């Protein structure tokens, strides 16, 4: 019989609807039940695409004995970290502090007041049962000891938070700091395989975006080299889907050969923007970088586009309970799909070996070098794609997350402008319209929806920042000021909800549920943090709307992020993106509509394709980080010739028709 999770808008929670566990969703009712029964809380946090979440579910949560132990001694709460990033952040902070590492599934034991006294990640069934028995006995014999332990943990973390640098206590980021960040990244760079650090290895999308902007502003060749070589290493590896396009979440090895196979919307949104910028900045990289962009857009539209005109969250790592089943191949399987001659040739090209590069003699597909016969490879790729569609397919988490759709709106609109693909811009606009129409309820942005039904969770800072940034990207790609106005309205609400007296941003709104600890969001991890996403959106809005107060506010917010940017730039990539754009001015290029096109917002996109447009071409080939508003009807053509204005911060030049007056890469 389904449990309480059956009515959830989270596919992850729905996966547990038939467990023999009396699961509760996070909420006051669950805590009231724990107080009524005077039992601790068993908190389990995960997400739908998580491989080890599935493993623990099959081993433990589908087991009658585990269910009986949980129901007898605990109130069991299941949380989708993607719906409740605030809850996830608080208890991940606890888990990391107590164990030295974090990850999912996350398991925490709490007092009925929410104070944690035990935390960990994946537990095999025997260890889980041992833990449940010990805690049940301990709570029955001396609950006060466990309560006091939870109170001490909370107090220690509060004390550590109070000792952290406050806004204004650190000097603001200056150009020397940005150069020092590049130097530190260069020291941590993996010169053999690209990226940073060892295994597991995550695509460093935000750091790559920073490096491209630093090169665009300074001409620093090392920044471009690190970004270019990392992008190529990933694009040719098993972490990139060589058949369908799209990136897996991370690799389990240094060489990017074997991915953890889930595909997340936020990773692909961020990387889409990086590869689009690399393609416009470095002509030597353009052929393969543009290929990656086009393949990834095709995959996004095929596998993550929903009936509601927005993008789903992820594809699972597992298929039928087997990790990577859809994606890996043996030489025999290639020959069965392609015939012996083409199969053997494809195996050599794609690194599919008799012993395998993954498990059980299977291999991921890698494209370490371009095929000598592109037409042959196109045919092979199409045949393998068709053959793969006949295999079982991974599950899809089809909830629509505001923040992640905001990232994709921004990247898709930008890529559509870079490659003159107006259909991509139109898709981004349709997605933005759905999120604005569905996720804003009584003026308050919500976190997510599913099948057109909006969830109850309130939007957090990253939802506001990323969505506003997507709307600003649409303004730039179309020239339509309606998107700029929508972004301004959203940011005005964000400042009321998240703005602090010292000029910083909180991770959750003033109307958010009070948790045992305040969620911290000063850094960037797998996706932009709330503070940096708002800082970047406020900065870009300040430039595009000529709002000097927003430029000042962005500078204040970035100052609060300066310590982590200096100490650990790998975990401040989005903040460094904003700092680079601020150091450049920010620079804003505004182009008048192309003469001969319909004079209206967003007009002329089709007409520009193939047209003689030196200003548009120069803008597209300009430095990464320069904001370009293309087709602003407020700017008129001069004598039938397209014109442009260039603004640096609050100072603008006179309109020009000369392409060489637009910003360019120093030394480029």
Image (tube, grey):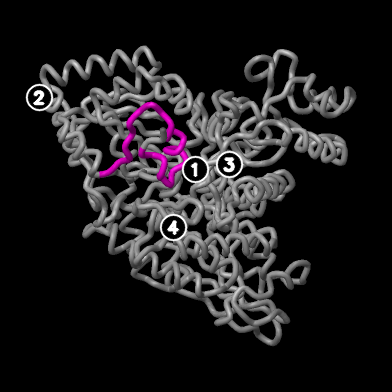
Residue drawn at x 70%, y 29% is 366
CA separation, marks 4 and 1?
17 Å
In primary-sequence order, the first of circles 3 and 2 is 2
Q: Name the front one of labels 4 and 1.
A: 1
- Please say whether residue 581 is visible from this viewpoint: yes
In primary-sequence order, the first of circles 3 and 1 is 1
Describe the element under mark 4 as helix, strand or loop: helix
Q: Which mark is residue 497?
A: none
Judging depth in this view, the residue of 337 and 285 nearest the camera is 337
Q: Label 2 crowding class (10 Å Cα cut-off): few <14, some 14-19, many 20+?
A: few
Give coordinates of residue 441: x percent, y percent: 37, 63
Magenta span = 4-27
Q: Name the front one of labels 4 and 3.
A: 3
In primary-sequence order, the first of circles 4 and 2 is 2
Residue drawn at x 15%, y 35% is 36
Q: Residue furthest right?
A: 341
CA separation, marks 4 and 2?
54 Å
Q: Which mark is residue 227?
A: 3
Q: Name the front one of labels 3 and 2.
A: 2
The residue that label 2 is drawn on is 144
Give coordinates of residue 392: x percent, y percent: 66, 31
């Amino acid at each position: 019989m389904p449990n309480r999770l059956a009515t959830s808008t989270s596919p992850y929670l729905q996966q547990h609807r038939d467990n023999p566990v009396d699961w509760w969703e996070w909420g006051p009712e669950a805590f009231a039940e724990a107080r009524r029964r005077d039992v601790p809380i068993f908190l389990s946090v995960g997400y739908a695409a998580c491989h080890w979440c599935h493993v623990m579910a099959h081993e433990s949560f589908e087991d009658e004995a585990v269910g009986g132990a949980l129901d007898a001694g605990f109130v069991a709460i299941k949380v989708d970290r993607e719906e409740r990033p605030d809850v996830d952040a608080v208890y991940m902070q606890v888990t990391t502090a107590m164990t030295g590492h974090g990850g999912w599934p996350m398991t925490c034991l709490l007092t009925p007041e929410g104070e944690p006294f035990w935390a960990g990640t994946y537990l095999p069934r025997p260890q889980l049962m041992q833990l449940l028995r010990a805690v049940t006995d301990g709570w029955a014999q001396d609950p006060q000891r466990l309560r006091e332990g939870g109170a001490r943990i909370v107090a220690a973390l509060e004390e550590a938070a109070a000792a952290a640098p406050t806004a204004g206590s650190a000097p603001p980021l200056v150009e020397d700091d940005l150069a020092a960040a590049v130097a530190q990244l260069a020291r941590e760079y993996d010169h053999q395989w690209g990226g940073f650090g060892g295994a597991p290895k995550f695509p460093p999308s935000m750091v790559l975006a920073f490096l491209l902007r630093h090169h665009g502003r300074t001409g620093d060749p090392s920044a471009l080299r690190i970004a270019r070589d990392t992008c190529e290493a990933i694009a040719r590896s098993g972490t990139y889907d060589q058949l369908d396009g799209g990136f897996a979440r991370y690799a389990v090895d240094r060489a990017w050969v074997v991915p953890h196979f889930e595909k997340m919307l936020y990773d692909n949104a961020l990387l889409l923007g990086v590869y689009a910028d690399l393609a416009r900045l470095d002509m030597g990289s353009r052929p393969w970088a543009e290929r990656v962009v086009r393949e990834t857009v095709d995959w996004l539209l095929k596998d993550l586009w929903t009936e509601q005109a927005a993008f789903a969250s992820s594809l699972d790592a597992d298929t039928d309970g087997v990790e990577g089943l859809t994606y890996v191949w043996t030489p025999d399987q290639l020959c069965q799909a392609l015939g012996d001659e083409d199969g053997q040739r494809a195996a050599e090209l794609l690194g599919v070996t008799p012993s395998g590069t993954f498990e059980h003699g299977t291999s991921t597909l890698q494209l370490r070098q371009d095929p000598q016969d592109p037409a042959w490879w196109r045919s092979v790729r199409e045949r393998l794609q068709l053959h793969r569609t006949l295999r079982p397919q991974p599950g899809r988490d089809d909830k629509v997350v505001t923040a992640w759709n905001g990232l994709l709106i921004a990247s898709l609109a930008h890529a559509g402008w870079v490659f003159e693909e107006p259909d991509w811009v139109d898709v981004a606009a349709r997605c933005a319209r759905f999120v604005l129409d569905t996720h804003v309820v009584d003026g308050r942005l919500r976190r997510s929806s599913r099948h057109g039904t909006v969830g109850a969770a309130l939007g957090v800072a990253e939802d506001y920042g990323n969505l506003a940034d997507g709307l600003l990207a649409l303004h730039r790609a179309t020239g339509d000021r309606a998107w700029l106005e929508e972004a301004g309205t959203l940011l005005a609400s964000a400042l009321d909800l998240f703005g602090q007296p010292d000029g910083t941003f909180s991770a959750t709104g003033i109307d958010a549920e009070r948790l045992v600890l305040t969620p911290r969001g000063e850094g960037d991890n797998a996706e932009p943090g709330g503070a940096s996403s708002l800082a970047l959106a406020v900065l870009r809005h300040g430039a595009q709307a000529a709002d000097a107060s927003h430029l000042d506010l962005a500078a204040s917010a970035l100052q609060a992020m300066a310590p982590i940017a200096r100490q650990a730039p790998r975990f401040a990539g989005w903040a460094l993106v904003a700092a680079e754009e601020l150091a450049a001015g920010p620079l804003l290029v505004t182009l008048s509509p192309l003469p001969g096109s319909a004079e209206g917002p967003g007009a002329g996109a089709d007409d520009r394709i193939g047209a003689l447009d030196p200003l548009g071409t120069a803008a597209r080939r300009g430095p990464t980080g320069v904001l370009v508003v293309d087709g602003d009807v407020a700017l008129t053509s001069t004598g039938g010739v397209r014109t442009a204005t260039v603004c640096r911060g609050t100072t603008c030049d006179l309109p020009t028709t000369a392409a060489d007056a637009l910003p360019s890469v120093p030394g480029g």
